[in-house]
Amino acid sequence: MASYLKKRTHDAYRDIPRATTPSSDNFSDLNQKHYLTNIEFDFHDALKYQGPIHYPSAIAANRETTALSTYEPEPIPVSQVQAYESAMQYVVISDNNDFLNPISSFINQLTLTNLLRSTVERCSLVRRMVRVVAIGDSYAEVAEEALKNGSFEDMMENGVNAHATWSIRLRRYGSAQHRISESAESNIDNHKDNRLTYPKTKQKRQARYGKNVRSSLTDEKNAIFSMSELIKLFQGKVNLMNPDCKIYILEGLRDFSLNNRLRGSDDNTKILLGRVIANGPKTSIYSPKTRICVTTTPLCPIASFTLCNIAQTQRNTNTAILDPFAGSCATLLAAAHITKGQCRSVGIEICHDGYVNRNDIKRDFDSRSLPPPLVIRGDCLSSDVRDRARAEMGGNECFPGFDVIVTDPPYGIREAMSSSPNLEFDTTPPLTQLFQVIAQDKAIGKPLLKVGGRLAAFVPVRKGETLEECLPPADVQKDAGLVLEGEGKEQVLNDILSRWLVSFVGA
Protein backbone atom coordinates (compact mmCIF):
# COMPACT_ATOMS: atom_id res chain seq x y z
CA MET A 1 0.00 0.00 0.00
CA ALA A 2 1.18 3.52 -0.79
CA SER A 3 -0.33 6.75 0.54
CA TYR A 4 -0.26 10.17 -1.08
CA LEU A 5 -1.89 13.53 -0.52
CA LYS A 6 -3.35 15.61 -3.29
CA LYS A 7 -4.96 19.04 -3.28
CA ARG A 8 -7.88 19.64 -5.58
CA THR A 9 -10.70 22.01 -6.48
CA HIS A 10 -13.92 21.64 -4.52
CA ASP A 11 -16.54 19.37 -6.11
CA ALA A 12 -14.17 18.52 -8.98
CA TYR A 13 -13.76 15.33 -10.92
CA ARG A 14 -11.69 12.75 -9.05
CA ASP A 15 -9.70 12.19 -12.24
CA ILE A 16 -8.70 15.81 -12.46
CA PRO A 17 -8.19 17.32 -9.02
CA ARG A 18 -6.60 20.74 -8.14
CA ALA A 19 -6.52 23.60 -5.67
CA THR A 20 -7.48 24.77 -2.20
CA THR A 21 -9.56 27.74 -3.30
CA PRO A 22 -13.13 27.43 -4.59
CA SER A 23 -13.58 27.64 -8.35
CA SER A 24 -16.42 28.64 -10.62
CA ASP A 25 -15.90 25.29 -12.30
CA ASN A 26 -17.58 23.11 -9.70
CA PHE A 27 -18.09 19.60 -11.00
CA SER A 28 -19.72 16.76 -9.10
CA ASP A 29 -17.63 13.86 -7.88
CA LEU A 30 -17.06 10.63 -9.72
CA ASN A 31 -16.96 7.31 -7.87
CA GLN A 32 -14.62 6.92 -4.91
CA LYS A 33 -12.50 4.17 -6.50
CA HIS A 34 -10.73 3.79 -9.82
CA TYR A 35 -8.76 0.86 -11.13
CA LEU A 36 -5.72 0.64 -13.36
CA THR A 37 -4.78 -2.95 -14.18
CA ASN A 38 -4.47 -4.44 -10.65
CA ILE A 39 -4.22 -1.17 -8.76
CA GLU A 40 -6.96 0.43 -6.66
CA PHE A 41 -6.96 4.19 -6.12
CA ASP A 42 -9.00 4.92 -3.01
CA PHE A 43 -9.74 8.57 -2.18
CA HIS A 44 -10.46 9.87 1.33
CA ASP A 45 -10.91 13.41 2.62
CA ALA A 46 -7.91 14.71 4.58
CA LEU A 47 -9.42 17.93 5.91
CA LYS A 48 -12.01 18.33 8.64
CA TYR A 49 -13.87 21.62 8.79
CA GLN A 50 -14.18 22.95 12.35
CA GLY A 51 -15.17 26.52 11.67
CA PRO A 52 -18.57 28.19 11.99
CA ILE A 53 -21.42 27.07 9.74
CA HIS A 54 -24.65 28.87 9.00
CA TYR A 55 -27.81 27.07 8.00
CA PRO A 56 -30.39 28.81 5.75
CA SER A 57 -33.21 28.23 8.23
CA ALA A 58 -31.23 29.81 11.03
CA ILE A 59 -29.99 32.93 9.24
CA ALA A 60 -32.65 35.26 10.59
CA ALA A 61 -32.48 33.86 14.11
CA ASN A 62 -28.72 34.11 14.25
CA ARG A 63 -28.34 37.47 12.50
CA GLU A 64 -27.98 39.40 15.74
CA THR A 65 -25.56 36.89 17.26
CA THR A 66 -23.48 36.81 14.10
CA ALA A 67 -23.21 40.59 14.09
CA LEU A 68 -21.75 40.52 17.60
CA SER A 69 -19.21 37.82 16.73
CA THR A 70 -17.17 39.85 14.26
CA TYR A 71 -13.92 38.42 15.58
CA GLU A 72 -14.84 34.91 14.45
CA PRO A 73 -14.13 33.58 10.95
CA GLU A 74 -16.95 34.13 8.48
CA PRO A 75 -19.45 31.25 8.61
CA ILE A 76 -19.82 29.17 5.48
CA PRO A 77 -22.99 27.53 4.16
CA VAL A 78 -23.46 23.92 5.16
CA SER A 79 -23.35 23.03 1.46
CA GLN A 80 -19.71 24.11 1.33
CA VAL A 81 -18.50 21.95 4.19
CA GLN A 82 -18.09 18.86 2.00
CA ALA A 83 -16.34 20.99 -0.60
CA TYR A 84 -13.89 22.25 2.01
CA GLU A 85 -13.18 18.80 3.44
CA SER A 86 -12.53 17.26 0.02
CA ALA A 87 -10.14 20.00 -1.08
CA MET A 88 -7.24 17.83 0.09
CA GLN A 89 -7.40 14.06 -0.11
CA TYR A 90 -5.48 10.96 0.75
CA VAL A 91 -4.91 8.66 -2.20
CA VAL A 92 -4.42 5.15 -0.87
CA ILE A 93 -3.03 2.82 -3.52
CA SER A 94 -3.24 -0.94 -3.12
CA ASP A 95 -4.08 -4.24 -4.79
CA ASN A 96 -7.80 -4.23 -5.55
CA ASN A 97 -8.02 -7.92 -4.65
CA ASP A 98 -6.37 -7.64 -1.25
CA PHE A 99 -6.13 -4.33 0.60
CA LEU A 100 -3.30 -5.62 2.78
CA ASN A 101 -1.22 -6.85 -0.15
CA PRO A 102 1.91 -4.67 -0.48
CA ILE A 103 1.84 -2.68 -3.69
CA SER A 104 5.44 -3.66 -4.40
CA SER A 105 4.27 -7.19 -5.14
CA PHE A 106 2.75 -6.16 -8.47
CA ILE A 107 4.31 -2.81 -9.37
CA ASN A 108 7.64 -1.35 -8.31
CA GLN A 109 7.81 2.01 -6.59
CA LEU A 110 9.66 3.78 -9.42
CA THR A 111 7.05 2.71 -11.96
CA LEU A 112 4.25 3.86 -9.68
CA THR A 113 5.89 7.23 -9.03
CA ASN A 114 6.44 7.81 -12.75
CA LEU A 115 2.84 6.85 -13.44
CA LEU A 116 1.51 9.26 -10.84
CA ARG A 117 3.84 12.05 -11.97
CA SER A 118 2.72 11.66 -15.57
CA THR A 119 -0.92 11.69 -14.50
CA VAL A 120 -0.69 14.73 -12.22
CA GLU A 121 1.22 16.78 -14.79
CA ARG A 122 -1.75 16.65 -17.16
CA CYS A 123 -4.54 17.24 -14.63
CA SER A 124 -5.68 20.85 -14.53
CA LEU A 125 -7.37 20.47 -11.15
CA VAL A 126 -4.33 19.11 -9.36
CA ARG A 127 -2.08 21.57 -7.61
CA ARG A 128 0.42 19.01 -6.36
CA MET A 129 0.80 15.46 -5.13
CA VAL A 130 2.80 14.71 -1.99
CA ARG A 131 4.10 11.30 -1.01
CA VAL A 132 3.63 10.75 2.73
CA VAL A 133 6.92 9.43 4.10
CA ALA A 134 6.34 9.71 7.87
CA ILE A 135 3.45 10.18 10.30
CA GLY A 136 3.74 11.04 13.99
CA ASP A 137 2.65 13.15 16.94
CA SER A 138 5.65 15.50 16.91
CA TYR A 139 8.21 16.93 14.51
CA ALA A 140 10.98 14.90 16.13
CA GLU A 141 8.94 11.72 15.76
CA VAL A 142 8.37 12.14 12.02
CA ALA A 143 12.04 13.01 11.54
CA GLU A 144 13.05 9.84 13.38
CA GLU A 145 10.67 7.72 11.30
CA ALA A 146 12.00 9.25 8.07
CA LEU A 147 15.55 8.41 9.15
CA LYS A 148 14.57 4.82 9.86
CA ASN A 149 12.75 4.22 6.58
CA GLY A 150 15.39 5.96 4.46
CA SER A 151 12.96 8.33 2.76
CA PHE A 152 15.64 11.01 2.33
CA GLU A 153 18.75 8.90 1.70
CA ASP A 154 18.96 10.28 -1.83
CA MET A 155 19.56 13.78 -0.37
CA MET A 156 22.31 12.64 1.98
CA GLU A 157 25.98 11.98 1.36
CA ASN A 158 26.57 9.87 -1.78
CA GLY A 159 22.87 10.03 -2.65
CA VAL A 160 21.66 10.73 -6.19
CA ASN A 161 20.25 14.08 -4.99
CA ALA A 162 23.06 14.90 -2.59
CA HIS A 163 23.69 18.23 -4.29
CA ALA A 164 20.07 19.07 -5.05
CA THR A 165 18.58 22.22 -3.57
CA TRP A 166 15.70 21.81 -1.15
CA SER A 167 13.08 23.58 0.93
CA ILE A 168 10.83 22.70 3.86
CA ARG A 169 7.48 24.42 4.29
CA LEU A 170 4.99 24.08 7.13
CA ARG A 171 1.25 24.08 6.45
CA ARG A 172 -1.47 23.91 9.11
CA TYR A 173 -5.09 23.02 8.49
CA GLY A 174 -8.15 22.94 10.71
CA SER A 175 -7.61 23.99 14.32
CA ALA A 176 -4.50 21.91 14.91
CA GLN A 177 -2.38 22.83 17.89
CA HIS A 178 1.19 23.93 17.44
CA ARG A 179 3.36 21.50 19.38
CA ILE A 180 6.95 22.11 20.41
CA SER A 181 8.91 19.21 21.78
CA GLU A 182 11.42 19.42 24.60
CA SER A 183 14.26 19.02 22.10
CA ALA A 184 12.83 21.86 20.04
CA GLU A 185 12.72 24.10 23.11
CA SER A 186 16.35 23.29 23.75
CA ASN A 187 17.26 24.16 20.17
CA ILE A 188 15.35 27.41 20.39
CA ASP A 189 17.04 28.35 23.68
CA ASN A 190 20.43 27.75 22.12
CA HIS A 191 19.60 29.65 18.97
CA LYS A 192 21.12 33.08 18.52
CA ASP A 193 17.67 34.66 18.40
CA ASN A 194 16.76 33.34 21.84
CA ARG A 195 15.22 36.65 22.82
CA LEU A 196 11.97 35.36 21.36
CA THR A 197 9.66 33.27 23.53
CA TYR A 198 7.62 30.34 22.27
CA PRO A 199 4.60 28.85 24.07
CA LYS A 200 4.45 25.08 24.31
CA THR A 201 0.95 24.95 22.87
CA LYS A 202 -0.84 27.51 20.77
CA GLN A 203 -4.36 26.97 19.49
CA LYS A 204 -4.73 27.94 15.84
CA ARG A 205 -7.99 29.39 14.59
CA GLN A 206 -9.77 27.51 11.80
CA ALA A 207 -8.64 28.78 8.40
CA ARG A 208 -11.36 30.52 6.43
CA TYR A 209 -12.99 28.63 3.62
CA GLY A 210 -11.33 29.32 0.29
CA LYS A 211 -8.25 31.00 1.74
CA ASN A 212 -4.70 29.88 1.12
CA VAL A 213 -3.01 28.28 4.11
CA ARG A 214 0.27 29.81 5.20
CA SER A 215 2.41 29.47 8.31
CA SER A 216 4.69 32.02 9.90
CA LEU A 217 8.44 31.80 9.45
CA THR A 218 8.78 31.49 13.22
CA ASP A 219 6.65 28.36 13.23
CA GLU A 220 8.60 26.92 10.33
CA LYS A 221 11.85 27.54 12.16
CA ASN A 222 10.51 25.77 15.23
CA ALA A 223 9.60 22.74 13.17
CA ILE A 224 12.96 22.66 11.42
CA PHE A 225 14.85 22.90 14.73
CA SER A 226 12.87 19.93 16.03
CA MET A 227 13.87 17.91 12.97
CA SER A 228 17.53 18.84 13.05
CA GLU A 229 18.73 15.23 13.39
CA LEU A 230 17.33 14.58 9.92
CA ILE A 231 17.89 17.91 8.23
CA LYS A 232 21.55 18.26 9.19
CA LEU A 233 22.28 15.26 6.96
CA PHE A 234 21.05 17.00 3.80
CA GLN A 235 24.01 17.86 1.58
CA GLY A 236 22.41 20.36 -0.80
CA LYS A 237 21.68 24.05 -0.33
CA VAL A 238 18.40 25.62 0.71
CA ASN A 239 16.40 27.26 -2.08
CA LEU A 240 13.01 28.63 -1.07
CA MET A 241 12.11 29.96 -4.51
CA ASN A 242 12.71 27.04 -6.86
CA PRO A 243 14.08 23.99 -5.02
CA ASP A 244 14.83 20.67 -6.66
CA CYS A 245 13.29 18.80 -3.72
CA LYS A 246 10.20 20.18 -1.99
CA ILE A 247 9.35 18.92 1.49
CA TYR A 248 6.14 19.68 3.39
CA ILE A 249 5.21 19.36 7.06
CA LEU A 250 1.43 19.11 7.30
CA GLU A 251 -0.61 19.51 10.48
CA GLY A 252 -4.29 19.32 11.32
CA LEU A 253 -5.19 16.65 8.77
CA ARG A 254 -7.29 13.64 9.56
CA ASP A 255 -5.28 10.62 10.61
CA PHE A 256 -5.72 8.05 7.90
CA SER A 257 -3.18 5.33 8.52
CA LEU A 258 -4.02 1.77 7.55
CA ASN A 259 -5.02 0.78 11.08
CA ASN A 260 -7.34 3.74 11.44
CA ARG A 261 -8.95 2.90 8.14
CA LEU A 262 -9.75 -0.59 9.32
CA ARG A 263 -11.19 0.79 12.55
CA GLY A 264 -13.18 3.38 10.66
CA SER A 265 -11.69 6.17 12.76
CA ASP A 266 -10.37 9.41 11.36
CA ASP A 267 -10.95 11.77 14.28
CA ASN A 268 -7.32 12.09 15.34
CA THR A 269 -4.88 14.41 13.66
CA LYS A 270 -1.21 13.75 13.08
CA ILE A 271 1.85 15.52 11.79
CA LEU A 272 2.69 14.35 8.28
CA LEU A 273 6.04 14.65 6.54
CA GLY A 274 5.87 14.46 2.77
CA ARG A 275 7.82 14.96 -0.43
CA VAL A 276 6.33 16.55 -3.52
CA ILE A 277 6.45 14.09 -6.38
CA ALA A 278 4.53 16.09 -8.99
CA ASN A 279 2.83 19.41 -9.68
CA GLY A 280 -0.21 19.98 -11.84
CA PRO A 281 -0.05 22.09 -15.00
CA LYS A 282 0.04 25.85 -14.65
CA THR A 283 -3.25 26.51 -16.39
CA SER A 284 -3.09 30.24 -15.68
CA ILE A 285 -0.86 30.65 -18.74
CA TYR A 286 -3.87 29.64 -20.85
CA SER A 287 -6.46 31.84 -19.14
CA PRO A 288 -8.49 34.16 -21.41
CA LYS A 289 -6.74 37.25 -20.06
CA THR A 290 -3.41 35.91 -21.38
CA ARG A 291 -4.78 34.94 -24.80
CA ILE A 292 -4.30 36.93 -27.98
CA CYS A 293 -7.45 35.49 -29.56
CA VAL A 294 -10.37 35.94 -27.21
CA THR A 295 -14.02 35.39 -28.06
CA THR A 296 -17.05 36.62 -26.12
CA THR A 297 -17.51 33.28 -24.30
CA PRO A 298 -14.07 31.61 -24.12
CA LEU A 299 -13.81 28.20 -22.52
CA CYS A 300 -11.72 28.38 -19.36
CA PRO A 301 -8.51 26.29 -19.31
CA ILE A 302 -9.70 24.00 -16.50
CA ALA A 303 -12.74 23.00 -18.56
CA SER A 304 -10.55 22.57 -21.66
CA PHE A 305 -8.14 20.26 -19.85
CA THR A 306 -11.11 18.40 -18.41
CA LEU A 307 -12.52 17.66 -21.85
CA CYS A 308 -9.18 16.36 -23.10
CA ASN A 309 -8.60 14.16 -20.04
CA ILE A 310 -12.10 12.67 -20.07
CA ALA A 311 -11.56 11.93 -23.76
CA GLN A 312 -8.40 10.04 -22.70
CA THR A 313 -6.15 12.08 -24.98
CA GLN A 314 -2.94 10.09 -25.25
CA ARG A 315 0.54 11.53 -24.85
CA ASN A 316 3.40 11.05 -27.32
CA THR A 317 1.33 9.04 -29.82
CA ASN A 318 0.76 11.55 -32.65
CA THR A 319 -2.91 11.67 -31.67
CA ALA A 320 -5.35 13.06 -34.25
CA ILE A 321 -7.71 15.53 -32.54
CA LEU A 322 -10.70 17.46 -33.87
CA ASP A 323 -12.78 20.27 -32.40
CA PRO A 324 -15.75 20.84 -34.76
CA PHE A 325 -16.86 23.98 -32.85
CA ALA A 326 -13.37 25.32 -32.20
CA GLY A 327 -13.92 28.98 -31.35
CA SER A 328 -10.56 30.33 -30.15
CA CYS A 329 -9.21 26.74 -29.91
CA ALA A 330 -8.98 26.61 -26.11
CA THR A 331 -9.56 22.85 -26.20
CA LEU A 332 -6.79 22.34 -28.74
CA LEU A 333 -4.39 24.41 -26.63
CA ALA A 334 -5.03 22.04 -23.74
CA ALA A 335 -4.60 19.03 -26.02
CA ALA A 336 -1.26 20.34 -27.27
CA HIS A 337 -0.08 20.83 -23.68
CA ILE A 338 -1.21 17.38 -22.54
CA THR A 339 0.40 15.62 -25.50
CA LYS A 340 3.56 17.73 -25.17
CA GLY A 341 3.06 18.94 -28.70
CA GLN A 342 2.87 15.41 -30.08
CA CYS A 343 -0.59 15.71 -31.62
CA ARG A 344 -2.13 16.64 -34.95
CA SER A 345 -5.12 18.87 -34.42
CA VAL A 346 -7.80 20.44 -36.58
CA GLY A 347 -10.35 23.04 -35.57
CA ILE A 348 -13.47 23.93 -37.51
CA GLU A 349 -14.98 27.35 -36.90
CA ILE A 350 -17.86 28.92 -38.79
CA CYS A 351 -17.16 32.54 -37.80
CA HIS A 352 -15.09 34.91 -39.93
CA ASP A 353 -11.73 36.40 -38.93
CA GLY A 354 -13.40 39.53 -37.63
CA TYR A 355 -14.85 37.45 -34.82
CA VAL A 356 -12.32 34.61 -34.49
CA ASN A 357 -8.96 35.68 -35.90
CA ARG A 358 -7.03 32.64 -37.19
CA ASN A 359 -3.70 34.48 -37.12
CA ASP A 360 -4.22 35.34 -33.46
CA ILE A 361 -4.93 31.67 -32.73
CA LYS A 362 -1.64 30.72 -34.35
CA ARG A 363 0.17 33.35 -32.28
CA ASP A 364 -1.38 31.92 -29.10
CA PHE A 365 0.19 28.55 -29.88
CA ASP A 366 3.51 29.93 -31.15
CA SER A 367 3.99 32.09 -28.05
CA ARG A 368 3.71 28.95 -25.91
CA SER A 369 5.99 26.86 -28.14
CA LEU A 370 3.12 24.55 -29.11
CA PRO A 371 2.30 23.37 -32.64
CA PRO A 372 -0.74 25.28 -33.93
CA PRO A 373 -3.76 23.45 -35.30
CA LEU A 374 -5.14 23.83 -38.78
CA VAL A 375 -8.20 26.03 -38.35
CA ILE A 376 -10.73 25.60 -41.15
CA ARG A 377 -13.33 28.28 -41.71
CA GLY A 378 -16.63 26.61 -42.37
CA ASP A 379 -19.52 24.63 -40.96
CA CYS A 380 -18.72 21.22 -39.49
CA LEU A 381 -22.09 20.07 -40.86
CA SER A 382 -20.74 20.52 -44.39
CA SER A 383 -19.34 17.32 -45.91
CA ASP A 384 -16.76 19.36 -47.85
CA VAL A 385 -15.46 20.91 -44.63
CA ARG A 386 -15.22 17.52 -42.92
CA ASP A 387 -13.42 16.14 -45.98
CA ARG A 388 -10.87 18.95 -45.63
CA ALA A 389 -10.36 18.03 -41.97
CA ARG A 390 -9.79 14.38 -42.86
CA ALA A 391 -7.46 15.34 -45.70
CA GLU A 392 -5.19 17.14 -43.23
CA MET A 393 -4.79 13.85 -41.37
CA GLY A 394 -3.76 11.81 -44.40
CA GLY A 395 -6.63 11.69 -46.84
CA ASN A 396 -10.20 10.48 -46.99
CA GLU A 397 -9.51 6.98 -48.31
CA CYS A 398 -7.07 5.60 -45.74
CA PHE A 399 -7.87 7.79 -42.74
CA PRO A 400 -9.59 5.64 -40.05
CA GLY A 401 -11.02 8.66 -38.24
CA PHE A 402 -9.87 11.04 -35.53
CA ASP A 403 -8.64 9.52 -32.28
CA VAL A 404 -10.37 12.20 -30.22
CA ILE A 405 -13.14 14.72 -30.74
CA VAL A 406 -13.42 17.35 -28.01
CA THR A 407 -15.85 20.21 -28.21
CA ASP A 408 -18.00 22.73 -26.41
CA PRO A 409 -20.93 23.23 -28.83
CA PRO A 410 -22.85 26.52 -28.98
CA TYR A 411 -25.40 26.82 -26.19
CA GLY A 412 -27.87 28.94 -28.18
CA ILE A 413 -30.06 27.90 -31.10
CA ARG A 414 -27.97 27.39 -34.23
CA GLU A 415 -29.02 29.64 -37.10
CA ALA A 416 -29.10 28.43 -40.68
CA MET A 417 -26.24 30.21 -42.44
CA SER A 418 -28.31 31.51 -45.33
CA SER A 419 -29.13 34.83 -46.86
CA SER A 420 -32.77 33.86 -47.23
CA PRO A 421 -34.90 35.60 -44.59
CA ASN A 422 -37.70 33.10 -45.16
CA LEU A 423 -35.77 30.08 -43.85
CA GLU A 424 -36.67 29.07 -40.32
CA PHE A 425 -34.03 28.54 -37.69
CA ASP A 426 -32.92 24.95 -37.14
CA THR A 427 -33.70 24.22 -33.50
CA THR A 428 -31.92 20.86 -33.46
CA PRO A 429 -29.17 21.02 -30.79
CA PRO A 430 -25.68 21.38 -32.31
CA LEU A 431 -24.42 18.15 -30.71
CA THR A 432 -27.31 16.19 -32.23
CA GLN A 433 -26.55 17.73 -35.62
CA LEU A 434 -22.93 16.67 -35.22
CA PHE A 435 -23.98 13.11 -34.41
CA GLN A 436 -26.19 13.06 -37.50
CA VAL A 437 -23.33 13.94 -39.84
CA ILE A 438 -21.02 11.48 -38.03
CA ALA A 439 -23.65 8.83 -38.83
CA GLN A 440 -23.76 9.95 -42.47
CA ASP A 441 -19.98 9.70 -42.82
CA LYS A 442 -19.92 6.32 -41.13
CA ALA A 443 -22.57 5.00 -43.52
CA ILE A 444 -20.47 5.88 -46.59
CA GLY A 445 -17.21 4.52 -45.16
CA LYS A 446 -15.61 7.85 -44.21
CA PRO A 447 -15.64 7.78 -40.39
CA LEU A 448 -15.04 11.02 -38.54
CA LEU A 449 -14.19 9.19 -35.29
CA LYS A 450 -12.24 5.94 -35.31
CA VAL A 451 -13.49 2.76 -33.67
CA GLY A 452 -12.38 2.95 -30.04
CA GLY A 453 -11.94 6.72 -30.30
CA ARG A 454 -13.64 9.06 -27.86
CA LEU A 455 -15.86 12.09 -28.13
CA ALA A 456 -16.14 14.37 -25.09
CA ALA A 457 -18.47 17.35 -25.07
CA PHE A 458 -20.38 19.72 -22.86
CA VAL A 459 -24.17 19.52 -23.10
CA PRO A 460 -26.21 22.56 -21.97
CA VAL A 461 -29.22 21.66 -19.82
CA ARG A 462 -31.70 24.35 -18.81
CA LYS A 463 -33.88 24.44 -15.73
CA GLY A 464 -36.74 21.99 -16.11
CA GLU A 465 -34.85 19.82 -18.61
CA THR A 466 -33.03 16.55 -18.02
CA LEU A 467 -29.73 15.42 -19.49
CA GLU A 468 -31.47 12.57 -21.32
CA GLU A 469 -33.74 15.07 -23.09
CA CYS A 470 -30.76 17.16 -24.24
CA LEU A 471 -28.55 14.31 -25.47
CA PRO A 472 -28.78 13.15 -29.08
CA PRO A 473 -31.66 10.65 -29.41
CA ALA A 474 -30.80 6.98 -28.89
CA ASP A 475 -31.34 6.12 -32.57
CA VAL A 476 -28.99 8.91 -33.64
CA GLN A 477 -26.34 7.68 -31.19
CA LYS A 478 -26.72 4.16 -32.58
CA ASP A 479 -26.45 5.31 -36.21
CA ALA A 480 -23.33 7.31 -35.34
CA GLY A 481 -21.80 4.26 -33.63
CA LEU A 482 -21.31 6.18 -30.39
CA VAL A 483 -21.91 4.65 -26.96
CA LEU A 484 -22.35 6.85 -23.88
CA GLU A 485 -19.81 6.17 -21.11
CA GLY A 486 -21.07 6.61 -17.57
CA GLU A 487 -23.79 9.04 -16.58
CA GLY A 488 -22.11 12.38 -17.21
CA LYS A 489 -21.32 15.02 -14.60
CA GLU A 490 -23.01 18.34 -14.01
CA GLN A 491 -21.52 21.80 -13.66
CA VAL A 492 -23.98 24.45 -12.52
CA LEU A 493 -23.42 27.71 -14.40
CA ASN A 494 -26.29 29.74 -12.93
CA ASP A 495 -29.82 29.36 -11.59
CA ILE A 496 -31.27 28.35 -14.95
CA LEU A 497 -28.41 26.69 -16.82
CA SER A 498 -26.05 23.79 -16.22
CA ARG A 499 -23.67 22.02 -18.52
CA TRP A 500 -22.97 18.32 -18.36
CA LEU A 501 -19.70 16.73 -19.37
CA VAL A 502 -20.41 13.56 -21.33
CA SER A 503 -18.15 11.06 -23.07
CA PHE A 504 -18.87 8.65 -25.91
CA VAL A 505 -16.74 5.86 -27.35
CA GLY A 506 -16.77 4.88 -31.00
CA ALA A 507 -18.06 1.38 -31.68
Image (cartoon, rainbow, N blue to C red):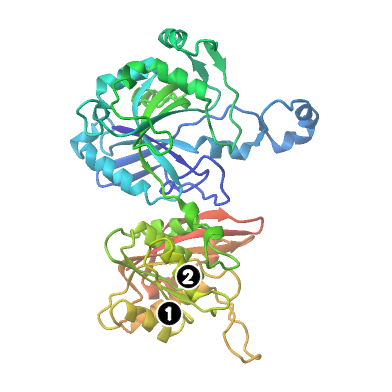
Of 60 and 231, the residue lying toward us: 231
Q: Amino acid at mark 1?
A: Val
Whichever of callouts 1 and 2 sits on the residue coming sooner in the sequence is 2
Q: Is residue 181 among the parts visible in the rendering?
A: no
Report the residue at 37% width, 15% height from top: 140
Report the residue at 59% width, 65% height from top: 297
Quarter-of-image position of residue 40:
top left
Q: Amino acid at mark 2?
A: Ile
The N terminus sits in image quarter: top left
Q: Position of residue 153 (x, y in %)?
A: 24, 26
- The residue that mark 1 highlights is 437
Q: Position of residue 412 (x, y in %)?
A: 60, 71
Of 483 and 2, the residue lying toward us: 2
The residues tagged by marks 1 and 2 sit, at their Cα atoms, a distance apart of 27 Å
- The residue that mark 2 highlights is 361
Give the class, few, some or many, for how many residues have Cα within 10 Å of label 2's Cα (few <14, many ≥20). Answer: many
Pair 1/2: label in front:
2
| In the rendered image, the vertical position of residue 54 relative to residue 255, given as above or below | below
Give the class, few, some or many, for how many residues have Cα within 10 Å of label 1's Cα (few <14, many ≥20). Answer: many
Q: Position of residue 144 (x, y in %)?
A: 31, 17
Quarter-of-image position of residue 210:
top right
